[in-house]
Image (cartoon, rainbow, N blue to C red):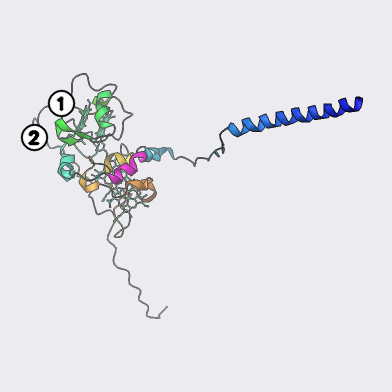
Amino acid sequence: MKKRVGILLIFAILFTAFLANWTYSYYQGLEEAYIPINEVEKGPVIPSEIKVFERSDKALDYARIPIDEQHRRTIATYYDNRAYPGAPPSIPHPVSEKMGIGGNNCLQCHENGGFVEKFNAYAPVTPHPEMINCKQCHIEQQVQRTFVATDFYKKPAPEIGVNNALPGSPPVIPHQLQMRENCLACHAGPSAVKEIWVSHPERVNCRQCHVPKLHEIQNVKLFLRTNNGSR
Ligand code: HEC
Ligand code: HEC
Ligand code: HEC
Ligand code: HEC
């Protein structure tokens, strides 16, 4: 009798163990397979260059945008609207009195650009969407002419297309970097000035190849090796 109870007990234990095991593996099987994502360590950030990447997520779109020849801006019209190179451009279109602080209205058009039917132009992308009080620096045009003639000297803008050391090498950045940290805002997209439109917005890290111009590039004479065996 005792023997039989013992055997039954062993079977009962084995059966419950089997049940427990089966339920456990059944529920494990229901869970989604999950491979933990390894945390990738971020590289060091250079604070003075961080704005270069501000619009990088749009780079591939910029590379694919077809060119709208009819509405491209030129460097001449670009500088018509500025008192001197680097000065804030005046606002060439009507804006209501209330627009400005908070920047909501301005940023609707100027954060990412796009074609504006009523002005028949692409809105230029602002390189500084974080400076929300736009009208602190940008004022509306009231008249098309200047009031009185002055002898204000308008410093000429740096030349374009002459900034390469060698044909095909990356041109140096001929302008200051203050207020011009956000390269893609001015150099890519349909509102970008024709002459400075970049053929490679997708290369992302602009300052890896383009360095600021620190001094004038001078034409050097062609180097000829004499090779007369005297040395
Ligand atoms: C309805 C869309 C729209 C709104 C809102 C708007 N803009 Fe514009 N803005 C444009 C367009 C389009 C142009 C280009 C006009 C042209 O080239 O003739 C432009 C041009 C400009 C320019 C000249 C840029 C340059 O490079 O010469 C400035 C500065 C400017 N806007 C500032 C502002 C400010 C500040 C506000 C808010 C008070 C504002 N805009 C609101 C569409 C808009
Ligand atoms: C602290 C002054 C200041 C404030 C505030 C400011 N801007 Fe500017 N903005 C400038 C200057 C200076 C430039 C010219 C930069 C250059 O050419 O080097 C400029 C250039 C621009 C341009 C022309 C970009 C191009 O293609 O050359 C646009 C568009 C613009 N700003 C829009 C705005 C809008 C919209 C706001 C508000 C959200 C704003 N700005 C706030 C000073 C300012
Ligand atoms: C506010 C608009 C603006 C921003 C932002 C800007 N640029 Fe420019 N860039 C220009 C203009 C306009 C020119 C033409 C020369 C001039 O007028 O200063 C130019 C010229 C250049 C040229 C020379 C092109 C040639 O063919 O000679 C290079 C290279 C350049 N920029 C690189 C950069 C880089 C890199 C950045 C980002 C760090 C940058 N730019 C940011 C407006 C801008
Ligand atoms: C891997 C190096 C490299 C990177 C990164 C790079 N460029 Fe260039 N860039 C060049 C070279 C090389 C040229 C000269 C092309 C030629 O002469 O055919 C050039 C030319 C230019 C020009 C003159 C017009 C043109 O397209 O030929 C501009 C403007 C310019 N680059 C802006 C930029 C901007 C803005 C960025 C960041 C999105 C950038 N570059 C990233 C190498 C680079």
Could you tell me residue 153's position as x and y percent?
16, 40
Residue type (three-letter) at the residue carrying disc 1: Pro
Near-viewer residue (207 or 82): 207
Using the image, determine if residue 219 lies above or below residue 79: below
In the displayed structure image, the side of residue 116 where residue 225 appears, left or right: right
Q: Quadrant of residue 29?
A: top right
Looking at the image, the residue that sits furthest to the right is 2
The residue where tag 2 is placed is 149
Near-viewer residue (9 or 209): 9
The residue where tag 1 is placed is 94
Could you tell me residue 213's position as x and y percent?
32, 49
Res 54 visible: yes
Magenta span: 56-64
Q: Quadrant of residue 38?
A: top right
| Quarter of the N terminus within the rendering | top right
Report the residue at 38% width, 46% height from top.
205
Mark positioned earlier in the residue sequence (2 or 1)? 1
